[in-house]
Image (spheres, grey):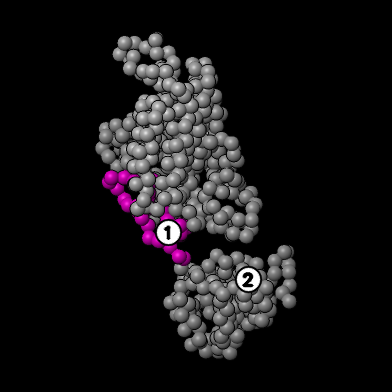
Amino acid sequence: MPVKTAQKTIIFPKIEDNIAYFSRELGIEISFDVILREFKIGRKKAAFIFLDGFANAEIITLIMQSLLEAKQEEIVPNTLEKVASKLLPFGEISLIDNLEEAVKEVLAGPLIFFVDGEREAISIDTRQYPSRQPEEADIEKVTRGSRDGFVETLIFNVSLIRRRIKDPRLRTESIQLGRRSLTEIVLLYIEDIVNPEILEKIRDKLLKIDVDGLPMAEKSVEEFLTEDFWNPFPKVRYTERPDVAAVHLLEGHVCIIVDTSPSVMIAPVTLFHHIQHAEEFRQNPIVGVYIRWVRLLGVFISVFLVPIWLLAAEYRALLPEGLQFIGPRESPTIPLFIQFILANLGLDLLRMASIHTPSPLATALGLVGALLIGDIAVTVGFFVPEVLLYISLVAIGIFSTPSWELSLANRLAHFFLLITTGLFTIYGFLAGFLLIFIRLATTRSFGIPYLWPLLPFNGPALLNVLLRKPVPIKGFRPSFLKTRDSDTAPPGEV
């Protein structure tokens, strides 16, 4: 049997023992997709072990053809060395000296090549993952710009970023997490830009992940990285666009790609990263400023519009003449804030129903929910008309928020403000607003203040948040990242 040394099982010279080990570990006779192919190279026994679903049949055929044509004198002595250097018509190969690593390699996709009498094996990367071609991102669509988006295949996603950043200092560290899932994760950063303290903090958190598996991919990894489970505000930003990931890498951020996920994590981030969109940078700067302000208005509406309207309706007598139209004409049978809560729940139910409804029926479902149910609810006096009007505006604000994670956090903030305002009027609104602000002010993303550049205050950076500056005059990377290289262009070029 193979000998264990330092908790590793050294590859045994007899090929039968190595095959027996794989039979026990991977169940070659039981699992139909674990393929064992035994043959002879020269006069020596050899074997391929690989997973059928990851194998590229054409490449394996070429490799076998080359090996089967080898003569005895061509492969002895130093068989593996000669095979690797002369007989394998393939570039991605490596030597392995223990069976645990060999098993991990097979499960990750490469082919393992054993030769009788050798204490090492060759890993040949013949992987061909089931995949789809890059398509436009669903959430981050732009009217003008690239249409390629991340997919579920990790190597494709790295290549999409490499295509945009041909910097030799772009680093792509591979990490395998999950004792059973062996999920592949890649840490991307630009070595001479990124803050080494931030990079080390993220890397350490990743390496400390000890769990059976990460089947939910990037979301499971995020929970291990952020650890603040009861804070709804997202501490990382997700993107499905390679150009957005590339921009953040050039600013000094770190990107985390998890295999099987079409979304890339960006860290660290602030609240204001979640309300920016690629569309602002695909248009003329003055148009980009207009788009950004409209989007900021939408985010404000999604959180504060209804609580402020409730306050105005409660203190209607104090409103100026021009705002006397605010509030219902007659006293409602159901308190207004209860109506808004029910309407909000109905909006979320409709949204979830549309997600789980087959595409051809989704439009019809939206029409039924928006027109038929809403109209009947007003007619029977369940809702006052203003409730549906303002809930519709809130829905528009939600969908205008670029970050889906932030829009969901804003939903909870909206509900909280709605309840405190409905129960305690102006005092409830002020207390609710203060608690939300404190929550945001005390939130940190990998040590970075979440409300930067508002808190701590940085005037030029805040102006850059409010106004989309033209790229030629932007000049400097965000100061909160404390990057090694703070200037985006050589002296005299900005």
- Please report the residue visible at 35 percent of the width from the left and 38 percent of the height from the top: 372
For residue 224, say whether it is visible: yes
Residue 146 part of the magenta-drawn span: yes
The mark lying in front, picked from 2 and 1, is: 2
Quarter of the image for residue 285 reads top left
Dot 2: element? helix
Span highlighted in magenta in the image:
129-156
Amino acid residing under circle 1: Phe
Quarter of the image for residue 314 reads top left
Say if 456 sits above or below 163 in the image: above
Query: Callout 1 environment at 10 Å: few (<14), some (14 to 19), or many (20+)?
Result: some
Q: Nearer the viewer, residue 107 or 448?
A: 107
How many marks on residues?
A: 2
Question: On the rendered structure, is 222 left or right of 324?
Answer: right
Question: On the rendered structure, is 182 left or right of 143?
Answer: right
Residue 77 part of the magenta-drawn span: no
- Please report the residue visible at 31 percent of the width from the left and 45 percent of the height from the top: 142
Which callout, 2 or 1, points at the residue further toward the start of the chain? 2
Dot 1: element? helix
Of the numbered discs in the image, which one, if any, rests on residue 467? Answer: none
The location of residue 439, given as percent across then percent down, is: 55, 28
Q: Which residue is mark 1?
A: 156
Amino acid residing under circle 2: Leu
- Please report the residue visible at 50 percent of the width from the left and 70 percent of the height from the top: 53
Image quarter hosting the C terminus? top left
Cα distance, mark 2 to mark 1?
28 Å
Say if 456 sits above or below 275 in the image: above
The location of residue 461, given as percent across then percent down, is: 41, 29
Q: Which residue is mark 2?
A: 26
